Image (cartoon, rainbow, N blue to C red):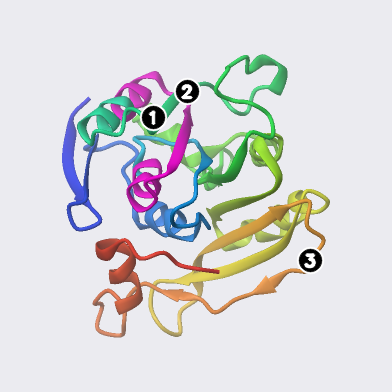
């Protein structure tokens, strides 16, 4: 596997990632920015489907007292994530579990994956159903972007099981998946906050950020959106603050 070495958060950490496989994108950095960790407070974060660990590293860099556990099923990507953790001297604060989170929970006999053991859970699930996208020659990239039938429900089931009472769940997905996500969250997570993500002003949303609280009965809120680029194509000031300065996006 050919890789590249890239700097994130204005050089606060470096990430080795596949040159042509599942690469870290702005989606992951936006998602990391909304996780509602508190400065100066300890806690445990679960990064489901962590890939090369960009979200885990983003959170650990922002919040020095947080411990992050990543879950990834592709062995080659797991090895890459562990190299990234060591490269950035985060070995004591980020751990990676090799496991397929879509399997039945009873088969995930991993000591690090304690049910109800996390104060925040975060996920960047695959976006496309297998019957909606063409197969990719790169197997790891294909797996990172394609859902099999029922997989989104399995992801939500896993996040629910791992989240402690009143824990937050944060994820990013395509706007057309929002009805399914709301249905899956019903009875599990409340106080849902939905943030559309637009590529440019006056365009249709290309992503939705969704965050909720386990066990809450508070209603859904549709919040102002995030615009990635201005009319001239330059990154917006708010997005630059997230990507370069590590600013959090409080919902």
Q: Which mark is residue 97?
A: 2
Which residue: 78% across, 57% down? 216
- The answer to whether residue 207 is magenta is no
Mark 3: few/some/many CA within 10 Å (<14, 14-19, 20+): few
For the residue pair 31 and 131, the one nearer the viewer reads as 31
Task: Tell me residue 249's x, y (percent).
Answer: 45, 67
Vertical placement of residue 144 versus 201, above or below: above
Q: Quadrant of residue 121?
A: top right
Q: Is residue 226 left or right of residue 169?
A: left
The residue pinned by badge 3 equals 218
Label 3 – label 1 distance at C-alpha: 38 Å
Residue at the farthest front position = 40
Mark 1: few/some/many CA within 10 Å (<14, 14-19, 20+): some
N-term mark: 3 or 1: 1
Label 3 – label 2 distance at C-alpha: 33 Å
The residues colored magenta run 55-81
For the residue pair 159 and 95, the one nearer the viewer reads as 95
Q: Which mark is residue 151?
A: none
Which marked residue is nearer to the observer: mark 1 or mark 2? 2
The residue pinned by badge 1 equals 140
Task: Tell me residue 30's x, y (percent).
Answer: 42, 60
Task: Tell me residue 110's x, y (percent).
Answer: 58, 17
Which residue: 31% across, 82% down? 230
| SS at badge 2 | strand
The reply to whether residue 135 is visible in this rendering is no
| SS at badge 1 | helix
| SS at badge 3 | loop
Vertical placement of residue 182 versus 143, above or below: below
The reply to whether residue 51 is visible in this rendering is yes
N-term mark: 1 or 2: 2
């Amino acid at each position: 596997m050919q890789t590249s070495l890239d700097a994130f958060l204005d050089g606060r950490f470096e990430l080795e990632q596949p040159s042509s496989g599942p690469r870290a994108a702005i989606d992951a950095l936006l998602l990391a920015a909304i996780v509602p960790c508190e400065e100066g407070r300890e806690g445990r974060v679960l990064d489901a489907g962590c890939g090369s660990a960009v979200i885990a590293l983003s959170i650990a860099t922002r919040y020095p007292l947080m411990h992050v556990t990543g879950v990834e099923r592709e062995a080659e990507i797991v090895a890459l994530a562990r190299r990234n953790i060591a490269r950035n001297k985060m070995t004591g604060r980020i751990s990676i579990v090799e496991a397929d989170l879509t399997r039945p929970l009873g088969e995930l006999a991993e000591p690090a994956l304690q049910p109800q053991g996390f104060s925040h859970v975060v996920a960047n699930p695959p976006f496309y159903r297998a019957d909606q996208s063409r197969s990719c020659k790169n197997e790891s990239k294909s797996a990172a972007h394609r859902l099999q039938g029922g997989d989104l429900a399995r992801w939500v089931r896993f996040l629910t099981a791992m989240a402690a009472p009143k824990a937050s769940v944060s994820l990013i997905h395509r706007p057309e998946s929002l009805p399914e996500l709301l249905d899956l969250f019903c009875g599990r997570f409340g106080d849902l906050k939905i943030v559309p993500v637009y590529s440019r002003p006056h365009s249709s949303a290309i992503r939705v950020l969704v965050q909720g609280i386990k066990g809450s009965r508070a209603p859904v809120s549709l919040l102002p959106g995030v615009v990635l680029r201005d009319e001239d194509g330059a990154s917006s000031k708010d997005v630059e603050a997230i990507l370069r300065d590590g600013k959090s996006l409080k919902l």
